[in-house]
Image: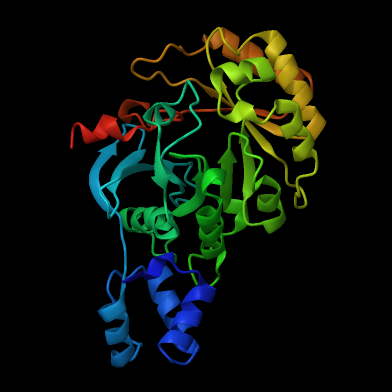
């Protein structure tokens, strides 16, 4: 059986016109039903011939992650615990933004792996270890389910932005992530602009420059340390690629007009929030013309870290601005349901399910 949502447009077209000997326009019809209308059965494809629907039903299936549990935060954030076909669990988060002209705007945080192999010491997902990569259908199934929950019909567009910042390191699942980005950008499919998609990596050499050349998403680098020694201590997996080598690679990263790389910097109280570290970060950001998203650490059970004091947080931000760096302090949402940055860990919810 073929997981039809795991096919790219080109693969679907080849399958329908080649294997099933149908006219190519039938692939366009099926593609639109799958991605624009989000159907969960072939029978629902009313303008597709009955014979083709029978062939599809006999040889294919439409996968949709099973929602095991939904948690709603007081701030409107929604965290979903999802079960894949083999029983593995991942989380995705729907984060409300500022409403504009009375319209709701939501960002979805997508997972790309079950667990994570990078071992960042401040991240709950990193403590899980790595199980496996997600497929395109498992990644984009999160989007389809998110749209359904939000009542987003694309005519009533609520889900506006997508960030690959959930469980896993996207560039360690490069093939499935790139396939997903192609499907997301398909005008006849999910039709997301690249300006609304961000891929966040802690710094993986393989696939980084290729991501820039694809032009399919913005880039965010999870930096969290302005020097190699500290990076090796708190981000041992990422630090295998020395910081200076990564920065040199980023100097050659392909950027669009008015586009900048974003550095994400999680402030850990007494660890990476000193004025000297702010100055070192400013030098890195200025070297690359990058902007910085500052995030105060979100406490997690059993973690050795603490959040920075408000005074240290403000001083760090001001030091960046003093040196001409565009720095934005991001407000964490969903902390009460363990949905904030660094808190995703399926065991937290699975134990309650």
Residue at left 66%, top 31%? Answer: 241
Which residue is pictured at 39% across the width and 64% down the height?
A: 153
Whether residue 77 is visible, yes or no, is: yes
Q: Residue 222 appears in which quarter of the rendering?
A: top right
What quarter of the picture does the C terminus occupy? top left
Q: Nearer the viewer, residue 128 or 280?
A: 128
Residue 142 position within the rendered picture, expressed as x and y whole percent measured from the top left = 38, 53
Is 144 situated above or below 308? below
| Residue 17 placement, left or right of 252 | left
Residue shown at 60%/23% (left/top)?
A: 224
Residue at 45 percent of width and 81 percent of height: 15
Q: Quadrant of residue 192?
A: bottom right
Left or right: where 295 falls relative to 33: right
Up/down of 184 relative to 307, above or below: below
In the picture, the quarter occupied by the N terminus is bottom left
Residue sitting nearer the eye, 196 or 23 = 23
């Amino acid at each position: 059986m073929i997981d039809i949502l795991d096919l790219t447009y080109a693969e679907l077209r080849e399958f329908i016109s080649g294997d099933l000997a149908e006219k190519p326009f039938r692939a366009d019809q099926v593609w639109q039903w799958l991605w624009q209308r989000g159907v969960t059965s072939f029978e629902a494809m009313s303008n597709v011939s009955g014979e083709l629907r029978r062939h599809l039903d006999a040889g294919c299936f439409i996968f949709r992650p099973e929602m095991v549990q939904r948690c709603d935060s007081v701030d409107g954030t929604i965290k979903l615990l999802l079960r894949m076909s083999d029983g593995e669990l991942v989380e995705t988060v729907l984060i409300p933004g500022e409403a504009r002209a009375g319209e709701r705007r939501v960002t979805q945080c997508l997972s790309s792996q079950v667990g994570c192999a990078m071992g960042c010491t401040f991240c709950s997902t990193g403590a899980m270890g790595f199980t496996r990569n997600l497929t395109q259908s498992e990644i984009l199934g999160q989007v389809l389910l998110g749209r359904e929950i939000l009542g987003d019909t694309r005519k009533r567009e609520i889900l506006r932005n997508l960030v690959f910042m959930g469980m896993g390191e996207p560039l360690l699942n490069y093939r499935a992530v790139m396939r997903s980005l192609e499907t997301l950008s398909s005008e006849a499919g999910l039709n997301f602009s690249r300006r609304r998609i961000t891929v966040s990596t802690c710094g993986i050499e393989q696939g980084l420059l290729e991501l820039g050349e694809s032009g399919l998403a913005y880039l965010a680098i999870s930096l969290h340390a302005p020097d190699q020694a500290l990076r090796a201590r708190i981000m041992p997996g990422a630090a295998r690629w020395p910081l200076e080598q990564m920065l040199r690679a980023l100097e050659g990263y392909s950027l669009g007009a008015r586009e900048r790389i974003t550095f994400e910097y999680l402030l850990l109280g007494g660890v990476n929030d000193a004025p000297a570290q702010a100055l070192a970060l400013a030098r890195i950001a200025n070297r690359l013309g990058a902007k910085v998203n500052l995030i105060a650490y979100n406490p997690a059970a059993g973690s050795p870290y603490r959040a920075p004091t408000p005074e240290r947080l403000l001083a760090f931000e001001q030091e960046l601005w003093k040196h001409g760096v565009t720095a934005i302090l991001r407000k964490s949402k969903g902390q009460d349901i363990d949905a904030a940055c660094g808190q995703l860990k399926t065991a937290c919810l699975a134990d309650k399910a």
